[in-house]
Image (cartoon, rainbow, N blue to C red):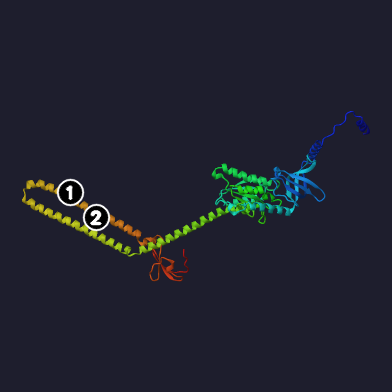
Amino acid sequence: MKSQLLQSLFDGETRRPLTVSEVNSQVKAAIEKAFASVWLEGEIVNFVVAASGHWYFTLHDGDSQLKAACYRGSNWKIRFQPFDGLQVRVRGKLSVYEPKGEYQILVESLEPIGEGALKVAFEQIKLKLGKERLFDEDLKRPLPFFPRRVGVVTSPNGAAFHDILNVLSRRTKSVSIVLIPTRVQGEMAGEEIRQAIILANEYNKTAPEKERIDVLIVGRGGGSAEDLWAFNEERLARTIRASAIPIISAVGHEIDWTIADFVSDRRAPTPSAAAEIVAESEDRIEAFVAQRTQDLFQLIDYKILHSRSVLQELALSPVFTQFPQKIKDWRYETEDLAVQIKDALAEKLRRAEDRLEAVKARLSPVKLASKLNNKKTRLAVLRERQFSAVRKLIDAKDENLKIEMASLDALSPLAVLRRGYSITQKESGEIISSIGQIKQNAHVQIRLSDGKLKAEVLETEKD
């Protein structure tokens, strides 16, 4: 060792001194290599936002301090606006600011420490977005009445997705589920959730109408305030507000509130509750159809009862009791007319024959023989035609009579009774067509096709 030192004293070549810039540059390279990624905790003091958008502050732990810089390219990822006195945990790399020879930490991420700090950051973001009216009710989009495709932005391994899947599978028959997997906890979780929402909106722009996503459920299960912090990020809130697809926020448990809950179109206290909201419309449609079906059947029953009552009144009308007798009278009259016509024709023929015989006796037998034969032939033809006409007339009348009797039988109240209907009358004989005509415990008479029943009214029920 001594020989090396002595040797250096006799070196003929003097070593070149370094410049300050060279020293700072070498120190910077050595520090950045040795401290490429470090975690620090401390209190922020002297926080400043430069015109360039960069943040500058000092980390202080009570005994020592370290300058820090967070450039604009990194601080957009920070979930809140830091301030003096806030306890934070930062991640970054140590470096040297060469012009001044000062070493500092270049912050890449920054998180508040403790529930109190998270609450302050939460209120800070909430106040800022509230002033911009991002929470206004008039900006919220209505949920589709009957969604067919539901996008779920959450972790595929979490309980939230399985809860949503179970509810929708159990309560709906036509809803399909599209999972957009993403992390829901950690440093980059908020950005991944944001990109998932953007991806869903980009998909809807090119997808066929029947395959588009109708509503998005964005959320996760419960956890601590730090676990849920990804849903408090300002950039995520702005993306939710800008989404063309209506969004239901379902983060944590019922008592947990995040910025995403305020800015979304609908807030569900749990992921299962979000699925219930989606399934609600289909349940209401089924209930509506069932109610209308019941109303229709009741209306049909009422129409049948009303028509039956009208028919019974018509069946007991005097026209149906007098008409059969008129048919019988017409039949007898027709038969009498047919006999009279037949007798009249026979008498006419007899007289014609008598006159013919008289003429025959007066005329020449030879000449008249031929004429007589012609007249007989013609007379026989006329006689046959007359009898044929009479038979046709009688047959036509008889056929009409049968048709009228069949129609009468179809309209007869006895035929109605034979088909299973009945007529209900008061003891006085008045026909009952409405429950308003009868009182409880009254005695009634029910007429059937083959007899009568006497009954007592136990209860009335109006349709």
Badge 2 or badge 1: first in the primary sequence: 1
Depth check, front residue: 171 or 58: 58
Q: Quadrant of the N terminus?
A: top right
- Looking at the image, residue 57 sits to the left or right of residue 219; the answer is right
Badge 2 is on which residue? 394
Measured in 3D between alpha carbons, the distance from the residue under mark 2 to the one under mark 1, in whole angstroms, is 20 Å
Q: Residue at x 18, y 57 (%)?
A: 343
Q: Is residue 241 visible?
A: yes
Mark 1 secondary-structure assignment:
helix
User: Which residue: 26% across, 62% down?
Assistant: 329
Q: Quadrant of residue 324?
A: bottom left
Question: Any mark on residue 381, and which?
Answer: 1
Mark 2: few/some/many CA within 10 Å (<14, 14-19, 20+): some
Amino acid beneath label 2: Ile
Q: Nearer the viewer, residue 25 or 193?
A: 25
Q: Residue at x 35, y 60 (%)?
A: 411
Q: Position of residue 13 (x, y in %)?
A: 88, 29
Most foreground residue, 447 or 431: 431
Left or right, 323 with respect to 119, comes to left
Counting the numbered discs, the total is 2
Q: Residue furthest top?
A: 12
Q: Residues within 10 Å of mark 1 (few under 14, many from 20)?
A: few
Residue 154 in picture, x, y percent from top left:
65, 48
Q: Is residue 212 above or below residue 13?
A: below
Residue at the (15%, 48%) spot, across then down: 378
